[in-house]
Amino acid sequence: MASLLLKHIYKVYPGGVRAVNDFNLKIKDKSFVVLVGPSGCGKSTTLRMVAGLEGITSGQLYIDNTLVNDVESKNRDIAMVFQSYALYPHMTVYQNMGFSLKLRHEKSAVIKEKVLKAAEVLEISDLLDRKPKELSGGQRQRVALGRAIVREPNVFLLDEPLSNLDAKLRVQMRTEITKLHEKLQTTFIYVTHDQTEAMTMGDTIVVMNKGFIQQADSPVTLFEDPVNLFVATFLGSPQMNIVEGMLVKKEGKIGFELEMNKENVVWFKEETAKQIINSDIDFDKHYLFGVRPDHIKISNKGIPAHVEAVEQLGDETIVYTKIEGHKNNVVVKSPLLNNINVNDDIHLDISMNRVYLFDVLSEHSLIGMPSFNKLPCQLKDNKIKVGKSTIVMDSEFMSHLLAGAYEKDRYLAIKPEHIEFEKNESNAPLNVRVDFIEKRTNYNIIFAVVDGVKPYLIFRANKDRNIKVGDELDVYLPLEHISIFDKHDDSYYSREIVYPNKAIAKLKTRNEKTYVSIIGGETLVYDNLHREDGEYEFVLKQDKCKPVFKHKVAKNIKDPLTKVNKGEYLKVSCYDEEPQHKTNTIFVKIKGFEEYVTLNIKNNFSVYKMPTFKIKVPFDGFELKPLEK
Amino acid sequence: MKKDNVRKTDFKENERPRTRFLQFFDIFKHRFVELMKISLLQAVFNMPLIGTLISFYSLVRSSSDINSLMTVFIITSICLLVSVIFSIVGLTGSFYCLKKIAYAEGEFASSSYFVGLVENWKKAVSIGFIAGISLSVTMIGSFFFYYKLSSVNAAIAGFGIAILVIQAMVVLMMSYYSIAQIVIYENKLKFILKNSFIFTLMRFQFNLPAFIIHPGVIVVLTSIMEITMFVAVGLIILFVSIGHLIWFLNILSGFDKFINKDYYPDYYKKGLYKEA
């Protein structure tokens, strides 16, 4: 039994291919976590990093509060079950299951006891003398599971264990694995690309895409409140209907023109309209409207549609319809319908209680629960001003802020699930007023107003928490979960400590040239800087330096070459980076600097493509301060 | 990489052999490597016996008169006593492994072999001693009857040799039953011997064919000529476990019928398909 903590885990393969990006997840003891996503999304890589079969490029992996980044796979007390079973063909089931224990030089009586016990759990006691070739796929997978069980690991890792099985067996084994988790009461991490498997098995599902966690939550929450278009369309069968269109305002109501057709307008309910108005949504832009097939009814009123296909599944009917201007089908799932035929003209009645709106570019959900609350803020000294409220930053928080954090147009970002109701040492209070509440299966979503700030602060509250519309209450924002963003979603809060890029430099001006010699490092040469000769504190600015490298090496990187005069660059060696949307924060080592140097560069450059290179330091790329005596 | 064919259907209980006779073929097909391993392990314990046989042959050929031949027979019978004890002790390991295989417990053959030895060697030494004495007596007795008495009274000599051979056969068969009992049940030595004697006689019609296959074939090959003796030695080293398997499954079928069904239902037809 073990809990796991994955903090800012990155996996970058040689050549700069990023398999996993900033993976943050806390896995509770005895939980069943499913990593789900399309092929190549990084789920298996993450699992292999947990197993110790892949190195972690950066970040920390804790198992039971112990940092295990450098702990060998065999010492992590983890057992892994592979898709291909990986059984030894020349050994019997008993021998396969007991082999790991034999390698550990366990006594044969102990091996026997453990193997028989595991075999009993998996109901394969009658197969112990058989060899893998005599067994079916399902039986082989049970043996593979048994081999993991006998080791009595703290964590079970299952990498698409059911993919090789046929559909019927998959369903059966799915239940078996869930039962096994109940019996063993151990932490399970399960990787699959099958959303049905994920939804039915896990108590926490982590949806991944392109190496990023899209959303991590319970199956019901992911289904009810997807934070972006990917999660919304990935989960659910048939998948969510997505129709492009525009927002319209009419007589205080807000509606959505499906495919910009003025005839096909659906009107949002009052609360949703309030949220849209409050969140500065641009009415001239296109958006994506989402509705699940089970939230559309075939009726006499609503959006006109034409039936293209009908699937009778026995207990329910799936109707594929076409609405004017929309190239894909709008799918309707309803209890058994016998009176609908192909080529019928019908109307679609959309239940507006459960609809979704996504941004076309960012694909973020714009109504309901957001992935992040983004409240405009202004940082000054050690305070974050949010509307009329002030949050006091501690020194730990401030040491992670990048240079641009204190500028205008910054946003305080916090995930809804991180907002707390109880005060403690590491969170900051924020006074809010509850404007409306939406009910969900597991919790209520609270839409609250922060005085002087426009978007709602949205958070979850357990159903037993007595919160009513109009209540004024203090919620608490844990500083460790707060980020400072700009409007492009670039973060100004680094996961690494941001040191002040300081070194000591000696200045000497000769023949109209100023030589800036970094003590213990290299010398920069500029046209006369008109400063007195002597020693100065040399502070490199985060945003002014540019990487410089030979075009041959980085031919796929746009705009890489910057002509530099001799003496205007420093050699750097990188050890980490934090890619953002528009920028890439890199952490580099430069000779003469006490700590690592933090630089913000364009995000078309990755340190993993080139671990050592040069940076151009323009004459305005640093500050010289007189040394304090 | 070789493509691994996966069965489409689950392996079911009813695919197991239904009798011990069919189980022989099932084990032969699926656990042949384990059988070879057991043979090689047993060969270690059969080395004194093999050494005794080879030296007996060479000594017999070099003996010029009856007195020296008698010395050879006496020395060989003493060596036989010791080497049979070793072989019988080794047999406990073999039977222990075969028990695991026949009872479908699927454990590691090599480690099971030594577990079997450690658990049962004391009783096996006693049984080996009895079998060794029996064979030694047979050897010396046969020499006496053949060389000393046959010229005087051929009928009595022949009868004497026959009695000696039959007692040796019975004692050897009893040894197999005894070792099988030792590795399966907890029992006192005297009851083990008593049961073995009863089973040997009661199932003689099954025991005799088994005895003809093993060790009959080996004894015959050993007796014909030198080259066949080496063939017999090869068979002992590589395939002795197949003979042991035949014996063990024969014994198990007897135990199933007369002991397990009523007294040890857990062992009854264990490893076979049991119809409800």
Image (cartoon, helix red, strand yellow):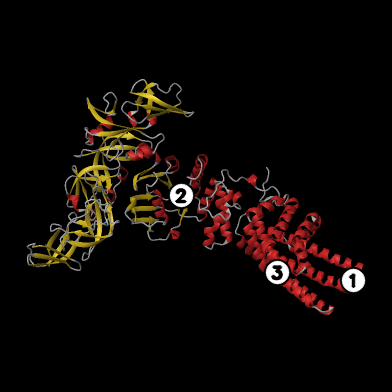
- The type of residue carrying mark 3 is Phe
**How dense is the environment of label 1, judged by Cα within 10 Å: few (below 14), some, or many (20 and up)?**
some
Drawn side of residue A305 relative to residue A32, left or right = left
The answer for which chain carries disc 1 is B
The answer for which chain carries disc 3 is B
The secondary structure type at the circle numbered 1 is loop
Front residue (pair A484, A1): A484
- The mark lying in front, picked from 3 and 1, is 1
Drawn side of residue A112 relative to residue A520, left or right = right
Drawn side of residue A146 relative to residue A561, left or right = right
Question: Does residue A448 sit above or below B38 in this rendering?
Answer: above
Q: Residue at x 57, y 53 (%)?
A: A93
Query: In the displayed image of the protein, which residue is found farthest to the right?
Result: B152
In percent of width and height, residue A81 lies at: 48, 51
Question: Does residue A133 sit above or below A431 in this rendering?
Answer: below
Whether callout 3 and callout 1 share a subunit is answered: yes
In percent of width and height, residue A566 lies at: 16, 63
In percent of width and height, residue A266 lies at: 29, 27
Residue that badge 2 annotates:
A158
Rendered-image quadrant of the C terminus of chain B: top right
**How dense is the environment of label 3, judged by Cα within 10 Å: few (below 14), some, or many (20 and up)?**
many
The answer for which chain carries disc 2 is A
Any part of residue A443 in sight: no
- Label at residue B86: 3
Residue that badge 1 annotates:
B150
- The type of residue carrying mark 2 is Leu
**How dense is the environment of label 2, judged by Cα within 10 Å: few (below 14), some, or many (20 and up)?**
many
- Label at residue A471: none
Whether callout 2 and callout 3 share a subunit is answered: no
